[in-house]
């Protein structure tokens, strides 16, 4: 079936929400029945339509699902919608427009509950499914679908009524995520999904199931305790948190971590281990908006309770949940723990951060930009103080209104002026000038930087951090004081040098930042030690180090197509759990993570990709 042709037909006849819903449903039909084009040629899809017939009398009699579709909620509504989708497809094949469908009853009066969340979620999943078939990069339909879903979640009453919550999402970094997610974080206890406890929608690798979970950040625990002890701690803490979830089980949540993300990757496995409670949502049976809102309220009420300091202290170590004023010092030794670089190099980076105020960590996928950025932030603060660190990810839909200030819908049919995330962060820092604050910008070159920063192009300069340089903002209201960036704010950006879909950093902005390049660290002793501690044989460690060094040299020497900025980072081969089959583990990384990168690098030279992968793979012993 030509999904592109059908999509264009839908876009010419229907609204975006209908387009995304019908594309999702046509994919489900094709998965259940086979090639719809062939079935149309056979009998104009009449054999399929017969299996979708279901009446109100059938529903009253409790008759089972007559179709091949896996449906578990309202059969009358769902089969009616799928019949409509088949009619749409028939009209598309016959070259007819929307007018031929006016007599089709799509939804009956008892099926009129709002399903905007379902439509937006399905749209995100559909766009991700399409995008991940190609190279990683900013795919406008996907980023737009994600923005639409975040907007709905941010505006729903359970989240809107809690101003300390923030909604984020990820489809991957450098390569497409196996398990994409949408997170809900309490900024008072964590600003990153790598640490703390938070709520998150986890989308299974096969894109058929979404799990709404109360979860733990896994990266920090694994990094600090190693793969084996880290996995044990995740499970022990999940069990401790379950004792504090109250009546969450009565709201439809399962108190356990036996969810199935359909993925055997290290990160996905740790997601499962760290889960406190979850609710399984079938993608083709997403609840209506009222049900989702009630579910979120129940989950967030529980999240509020376990976010209280006393509850956190019963699960975490005391130094992990102290109030900001009581943070233990974060020393240089703490920062170096787990870093694959020399202390002298890290100290050089710190010196540049303090002098320049604004720096960008640049490097190819897998060199540890985000990991190093967090260590730099805490080292600048000299404490692991989450309230003085803020993180944001730029993308093509991100704008000045999100970052600085702008008008936003107020829920009453009008608009109101709202301050952006950086504006609010600067206000907090201005009230606490004796202590440094750090603002992290992931994927800084994904956004239109001139559009996002606006007047801040001037105000972020290190020698213009005072009221003397205060400037009026674009949306400044009458009587509002001019804005300036306080001197205790540091900005650390992260930039992927290997993403061809991204433009270069604006030259006007470039001179305002110091650029720090992170290189692959396959030759560092801490890298070899990390593999050895995870149970990887010395011979395999040596193979990985030498083969990846040779591959990176070839990439660096290919100055016509690639260059040093495209070398592959070490973190692809850093285990987050104990490795029971080192040979199979290494080959799986080569096949599923390194090969896709090389196929993008050497798009027109398949033999070169094959040769490189063959050298990386370990033969059967």
Image (cartoon, rainbow, N blue to C red):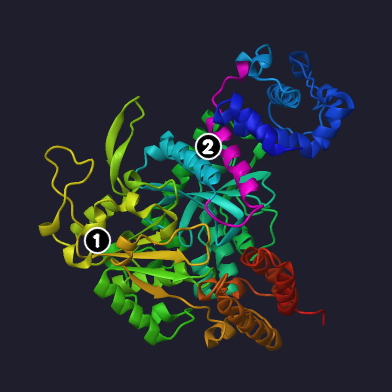
- The residue carrying pointer 2 sits among few (fewer than 14), some (14 to 19) or many (20 or more) residues within 10 Å by Cα, namely many
On the image, the x and y values in percent for residue 187 come to: 37, 53
Say which of 84 and 584 sits in front: 84
Residue 112 inside the magenta-drawn segment: yes
On the image, the x and y values in percent for residue 595 come to: 68, 67
Image quadrant for the N terminus? top right
Residue where numbered disc 2 is placed: 295
Say which of 205 and 457 sits in front: 457
CA separation, marks 2 and 1? 42 Å
Mark 1 residue element: loop
- The residue carrying pointer 1 sits among few (fewer than 14), some (14 to 19) or many (20 or more) residues within 10 Å by Cα, namely many
Residue where numbered disc 1 is placed: 460
The relative height of residue 581 versus residue 136 in the rendered view (above or below) is below
Mark 2 residue element: helix
Residue at the outermost right position: 42
Residue shown at the point (21%, 46%) measured from the top left: 473
Place residue 117 in its image quadrant. Answer: top right
Majority secondary structure of the magenta segment? helix
């Amino acid at each position: 079936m030509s999904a592109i042709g059908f999509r264009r037909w839908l876009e010419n006849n229907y609204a975006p929400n209908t387009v995304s819903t019908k594309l999702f449903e046509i994919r489900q039909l094709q998965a259940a029945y086979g090639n719809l084009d062939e079935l149309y040629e056979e009998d104009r899809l009449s054999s399929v339509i017969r299996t979708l017939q279901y009446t109100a009398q059938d529903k009253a009699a409790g008759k089972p699902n007559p179709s091949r579709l896996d449906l578990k909620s309202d059969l009358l509504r769902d089969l009616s919608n799928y019949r409509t989708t088949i009619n749409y497809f028939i009209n598309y094949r016959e070259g007819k427009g929307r007018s031929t469908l006016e007599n089709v009853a799509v939804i009956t009066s008892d099926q009129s509950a709002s399903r905007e969340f379902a439509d937006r979620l399905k749209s995100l999943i559909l766009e991700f499914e399409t995008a991940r078939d190609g190279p990683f990069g900013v795919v406008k339909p996907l980023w737009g679908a994600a923005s639409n879903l975040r907007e709905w979640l941010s505006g729903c009453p359970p989240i809107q009524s809690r101003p300390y919550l923030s909604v984020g999402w990820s489809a991957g970094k450098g390569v497409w995520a196996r398990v994409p997610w949408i997170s809900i974080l309490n900024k008072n206890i964590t600003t990153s999904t790598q640490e703390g406890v938070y709520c998150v929608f986890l989308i299974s690798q096969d894109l058929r199931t979404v799990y709404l979970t109360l979860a733990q950040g896994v990266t920090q625990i694994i990094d600090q305790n190693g793969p084996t002890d880290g996995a044990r701690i995740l499970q022990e803490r999940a069990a401790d948190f379950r004792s504090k979830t109250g009546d969450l089980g009565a709201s439809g949540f399962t108190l356990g971590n036996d969810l199935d993300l359909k993925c055997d990757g290290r990160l996905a496995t740790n997601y499962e281990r760290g889960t406190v409670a979850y609710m399984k949502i079938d993608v083709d049976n997403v609840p209506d908006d009222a049900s989702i809102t009630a579910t979120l309220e129940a989950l967030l009420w529980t999240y509020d309770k376990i976010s209280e300091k006393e509850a956190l202290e019963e699960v975490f170590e005391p130094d992990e949940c102290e109030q900001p004023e009581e943070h233990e010092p974060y020393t240089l030794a703490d920062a170096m723990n787990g870093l694959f670089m020399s202390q002298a190099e890290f100290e050089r980076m710190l010196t540049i951060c303090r002098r320049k105020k604004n720096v960008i960590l640049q490097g190819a996928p897998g060199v540890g930009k985000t990991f190093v950025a967090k260590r730099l932030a805490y080292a600048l603060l000299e404490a692991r103080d989450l309230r003085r660190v803020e993180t944001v990810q730029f993308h093509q839909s991100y704008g000045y209104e999100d970052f600085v200030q702008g008008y936003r819908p107020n829920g009453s049919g009008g608009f109101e002026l709202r301050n952006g995330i950086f504006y609010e962060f600067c206000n907090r820092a201005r009230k606490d000038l004796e202590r440094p604050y750090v603002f992290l910008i992931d994927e800084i070159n994904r956004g239109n930087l001139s559009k996002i920063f606006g007047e801040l192009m001037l105000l972020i300069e290190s020698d213009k951090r005072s009221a003397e340089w205060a400037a009026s903002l674009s949306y400044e209201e009458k009587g509002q004081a001019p804005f300036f960036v306080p001197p205790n704010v540091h900005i650390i950006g992260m930039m992927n040098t290997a993403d061809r879909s991204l433009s270069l950093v604006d030259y006007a902005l470039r001179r305002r930042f110091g650029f720090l390049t992170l290189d692959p660290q396959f030759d560092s002793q801490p890298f070899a030690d990390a593999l050895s501690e995870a149970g990887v044989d010395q011979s395999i460690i040596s193979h990985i180090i030498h083969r990846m060094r040779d591959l990176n040299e070839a990439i660096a020497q290919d100055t016509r197509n690639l260059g040093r900025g495209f070398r592959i980072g070490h973190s692809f081969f850093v285990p987050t759990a104990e490795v029971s089959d080192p040979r199979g583990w290494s080959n799986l990384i080569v096949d599923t993570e390194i090969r896709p990168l090389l196929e993008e690098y050497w798009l027109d030279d398949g033999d070169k990709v094959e040769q490189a992968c063959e050298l990386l793979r370990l033969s059967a012993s």
